[in-house]
Amino acid sequence: MRTICAFLVALAPLCADTVAPSDTPPANPAGILALIKGSALRYEGEVPDFTCTEMITRSEASGKTIAGADVRWKVHDRLEEVLSFVEGQENHTLITVNGRPTRYTHDSLEGMRSDGLLQFVMVPNWIFGPQAKTRFNWIRWDTLNGRRMAVFTFDVPPSVETRPLVNEPKVFLVGYHGLVFADPETGEMGRLEATMDAPKDFPFQEDSFEIDYGTVHISNEEFLLPVKATGQLRDGKLLTKNEIEFTEYRKYEAAVTVTFGDPSQP
C-alpha cells in the first residue's frame, strides 16, 4: 500500500451553516481583500514554537468521484498524534491507534497522512504572498458559525511544489483553486477550501482540502490557527478521507522520547 503525503480534498459543496445573507456586492472588495492578505500573512516568522493534539479519523470508500453524494465512507482507523511545530518545521508523534497505545510510528503509517498540512495553511503565502500570481474574485456573502463572511474565489497557477508520495522523490508543480471565507471587517479567515490543479501524470485524480480557522491560545497570546481540517483524494476508484481536529495548542517544551518497541510491530 502506498503512503500518501498529500494533505488533501476534492470538496463537496457545504450547506450546513452557510446561508447567504445578501447578494449585494461590497462597496470596496479590493479593500476587504487587502485586509484578508494582511491577516493571512501576519504570523510569518511570528508564531512561537508550539505543540497541539491531532485527532484524526481516516476513512475509505469506492467510487468515481469524492464529491459524489452517494459515497459511503467506512472508517479505517482513528489516530491520536502530537504535532510539534518547532523552528518552522512540523513533527508528528503517533500516540494511539483506535484509542489504544501503539508501537507504530507516524512514519510507519500507510495510507494518507497529514504531513505538512498545518504549516501549509497556517501562513498561506502560496495564495497571498508577494510572489503569488493568484487571481481573486468576490463571489458572495455567506454566514459561517454565526458570522457574516465575504467569500472570494481564488485561482493559483501551477507554481506550488509538492511530493505526493513519501517513498518516491518525484516533485510536481501544481496549482489550486477554491474559496476563501473571511470577516469583511478584520480580514480574518474563517474557512479555506482548495482543490488541486495537477498535471496529467500526477498520481491522484482528485486532491483537495478544507480548513476551518479559530482562535487558540499559546503562552497567553491569541492566534488564529486551524482547528479543523478535512482532506479527500481519489486514486482510481479508491476514495480516501482524513478528518482532523487540532486541539490543546500549547507552548512547545522539549520532552523525553519514549520508545515502545519495534515500530513494525502493533
Image: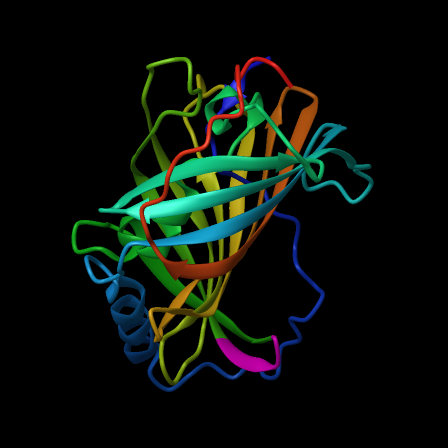
Asked whether residue 226 is in view, the answer is: no
| Residue lying at 45% horizontally and 21% vertically, measured from the top left | 202
Examine the image and state in which quarter residue 89 appears: top left
Q: Is residue 71 left or right of residue 196?
A: right
Give whichever of 150, 263 is nearer the camera.
Answer: 263
Q: Position of residue 122 (x, y in %)?
A: 36, 55
| Residue lying at 28% horizontally and 67% vertically, measured from the top left | 37
For the stretch drawn in magenta, the main secondary structure is strand
Q: Which residues are magenta?
A: 145-149
Indicate yes or no whether the magenta region holds residue 147. yes
Marks counted in the figure total: 0
Q: Quadrant of the N terminus?
A: top right
| Residue lying at 36% horizontally and 81% vertically, measured from the top left | 186
Asked whether residue 169 is in view, the answer is: yes
Q: Is residue 87 left or right of residue 105?
A: left
Give whichever of 15, 135 is nearer the camera.
Answer: 15
Up the image or down, 121 lies above or below 147; here it is above
Up the image or down, 250 lies above or below 151; here it is above
